[in-house]
Image: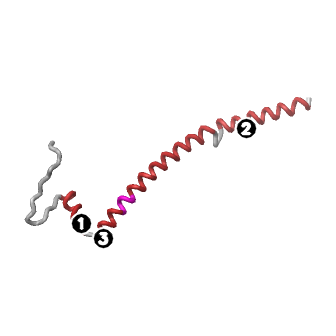
Amino acid sequence: MAHRAVPAVLIALLLVFHAQLWFGRGSVGEVAQMQRKLEAQKAANLLALQANERLASEVRDLKEGLEMVEEKARTELGMVKPNEIFVNLGPQK
């Protein structure tokens, strides 16, 4: 009887460990899902980093010179200098 109990216990433990590996916390599927989420977050972080660098460059330009301020005023506000003619060559609607 004792000879049959040891393999039965070992097989039961093996089944428990396999169930944990495939279905429990930290399972193979859950790890794969977390890796996909991690890759998506890294891509989002890269886009945010690029946007931050672009904004930092724009702020630096605004602090250092008036060329950027003039460009912003012309493009966003449509401002023109005195005795200047503004011609818009945008696409026709």
Decide: few, some or many residues near mark 2? Use Cα within 10 Å; few <14, some 14-19, many ≥20. few
Residue pictured at 41% horizontal, 51% vertical: 47
Callouts 3 and 2 close, C-beta under 8 Å: no
Amino acid type at circle 2 is Phe
What is the number of the mark on residue 67? 1
Q: Does 61 sit left or right of 5 as displayed?
A: left
Q: CA distance from mark 1 to mark 2?
A: 67 Å
In which image quadrant can residue 81 be found? bottom left
Callouts 1 and 2 close, C-beta under 8 Å: no
Spot occupied by residue 75 in the image (x, y as percentages of width and height)? 21, 57
Spot occupied by residue 30 in the image (x, y as percentages of width and height)? 59, 40
Q: Which residue is mark 2?
A: 17
Callouts 3 and 1 close, C-beta under 8 Å: no
Residue pictured at 58% horizontal, 40% vertical: 32
Q: In the rendered view of the protein, which quadrant contains the N terminus?
A: top right
Residue pictured at 73% horizontal, 36% vertical: 16
First in residue order: circle 3 vs circle 2: 2
Image: 92 above or below 53: above
Q: Does 30 sit left or right of 67 as displayed?
A: right
Q: Which residue is mark 3?
A: 64
First in residue order: circle 1 vs circle 2: 2
Labels 3, 2: front one: 3
Labels 1, 2: front one: 1
Decide: few, some or many residues near mark 3? Use Cα within 10 Å; few <14, some 14-19, many ≥20. few
The segment highlighted magenta reads 52-56
- Mark 3, secondary structure of its residue: helix
Q: In the rendered view of the protein, which quadrant contains the C terminus?
A: top left
The question of residue 53 being in magenta is answered with yes
Instruction: Name the foreground residue: 33 vs 72.
Output: 72
Q: CA distance from mark 3 to mark 1?
A: 9 Å
Q: CA distance from mark 3 to mark 2?
A: 64 Å
Q: Does 22 sit left or right of 33 as displayed?
A: right
